[in-house]
Each structure stands twice: as structure tokens, then as C-alpha cells.
Image (cartoon, rainbow, N blue to C red):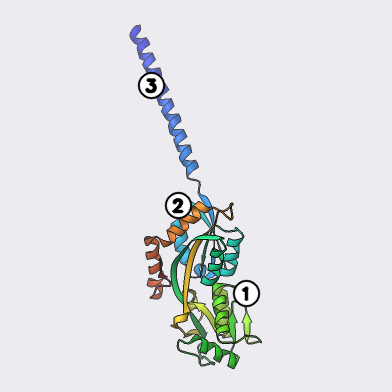
Amino acid sequence: MRKNRLFIALFAFMLLVLSACGNSDTKDAAAKQKKAEPTSMILATTTSTQDSGLLDVLIPMFEKENNVKVKTIAVGTGQALEMGTKGEADALLVHAPAAEKAVVDAGDAINYKRVMYNDFILVGPKDNPAAVSGDDINAAFKKLADAKSSFISRGDDSGTNKKELGIWTAANIKPAGDWYVSTGQGMGQTLQVAAEKKGYVLTDRATWLAQSKNLDTLQIVVEGGKDLMNIYHVMQVNPEKHDKVNSKDAQKFVEFMIDSKTQEVIENFGKKEYGQSLFTKYTE
């Protein structure tokens, strides 16, 4: 009788232990599930990084490594920087160094890092009616203005648009008239307009390579000038000035972009498909 009572007591104790373990496992599973909920971050960037396809590779890598869901807003660099000054984005990836420096100097952005570069090129109709060539972009713009050859401008305050306007200024030209068309669109759309109108357009090389198969009326006419380098920087919006930003993930994104593994992905992006890199790694 005593043995039966002891057996019953031991059996009840084992059930209690198993139940406790089961509850603990359930709690652990629930805790893990709760921990797995991703945070969210807003990246304001230029359309060239989007149109080139680079972000389609990099963003999933970052999201997986850091359990973050990134909302990418691809606009002109001017608009992306404005989002930073208003605290409407957490991180910025842009390519207009002078405008970027103003944002950093004003204290709206911190952790400012150089990431990569490619170059700007001038593309135009295959029959090249303005007969522009070589690597002197200022001379080419003067010929375009003199001939009033159709020129398609982004007109959107993007990094490319800022570069284009700087070239006109350096050439002492204020472009105006029917020959000068402003699209107010991103690089991909502007290239399409140039192809349809058989006009000239300044573009970054990455977007050109990614889109050129659909632009059979255009070709590169001017490239290689020393003043045509196109540098991209990444930065995080300053949490001390904009307290609602996700500074933790923004800092992780900056570190991710300059990490050696990411840099190798950037360096090799496009080589297989286009025979050359769309961007070149360029860390400090």
C-alpha cells in the first residue's frame, strides 16, 4: 500500500515537472516570436541607386542580417536631403557632395561616410547631330547650346540635375528655349524621354548600363573627364536634432554600407551582366 502511494506521488511530481517545462517552452517560444518582430527604418535615396538595381540586392541583405524592414523612398538627392533636414527619414544614401556637406554642417546628419562612386556620362542620338565627343563636358555643352540640340534635363534637384546645372554654369550658359526640356522625373524615365525625342542627356553610368538595352536610339558621346566623377555618401539623420528617428538601425545601415562584405558586393554588382561594375567601392 505504501509502495502504491509512493508511486502515485512520484508520478504526480513528474507530471508537475513536465507541465512546468512545457509552460517554460511555451513562454520561450512566445518570447522568441516577439523578439523576431522586425523594426522599421526609412531610407531616403536617389533614383539612380534604385533604377540601377543595386538596392534590390543590398536591402534584403541588410534586412536579413539586422531583422529590420526598410522602407526605401527613391527621389532626387535634393528631396532626399530635405527629408533628412525635416527628420522624415532615418538614413540617407545620396550623391551631391556640396549639398550633403551643407546638411552635415547644419547638424541634421551625422556619421557621414563615403561609400562608392561611378561617373557621369553624356548620351545622345546615334547620329549625333551636334557632333560632340571626347571627354570635355564643358565644350560639349557649349556645342549643344550653340546648335540648340534637344537636351533633356531631369529638372528635379537630384544629384545628376545639380551636376548638369553646374556644368551649364561653368560654361557660362543659361539653357532656355524649346530645345531644353525638363522632365521633373527620375533618371530612368528621363532617359526614356531622351530616347523618344532623340535628345542629349546627362546620366550616371550605372543607370545607363542598367537601362541601355531599352534605349536603342542613344549612345554614349562624352565620357571620361576628370570632373565627371559621381561619388555616393551614406549618413544617418541626427537623433539629437530629430528625436523621432530610428537612429539605432540607421547607424547599423551606415556600418553595413561600409562593411568589407558589402563593399565587395558593390564592387562586383553588374560585372556578370554588363561586363563591368556599375559602382566602384570607395570607403574612407
Residue position for label 2: 66
- The answer to whether 164 is drawn above or below residue 144 in the figure is above
- The answer to whether 261 is drawn above or below residue 136 in the figure is above
Coordinates of residue 169 in the picture (x, y in percent): 58, 83
Closer to the chain start, of discs 3 and 2, is 3
Coordinates of residue 168 in the picture (x, y in percent): 57, 84
> Quadrant location of the C terminus?
bottom left
* Badge 1 element: loop
Please name the amino acid that badge 3 sits on: Met
Of residues 155 and 238, the one nearer the viewer is: 238
Residue position for label 1: 184
- The answer to whether 202 is drawn above or below residue 98 in the figure is below
Which callout, 3 or 2, points to the residue nearer the camera?
A: 2
Q: Could you tell me which residue is drawn at 56 percent across and 87 percent down? A: 171
**What is the C-alpha distance between the residues marked 1 and 3?**
73 Å
Closer to the chain start, of discs 1 and 2, is 2
Please name the amino acid that badge 1 sits on: Gly
Please name the amino acid that badge 2 sits on: Asn
Which callout, 1 or 3, points to the residue nearer the camera?
A: 1
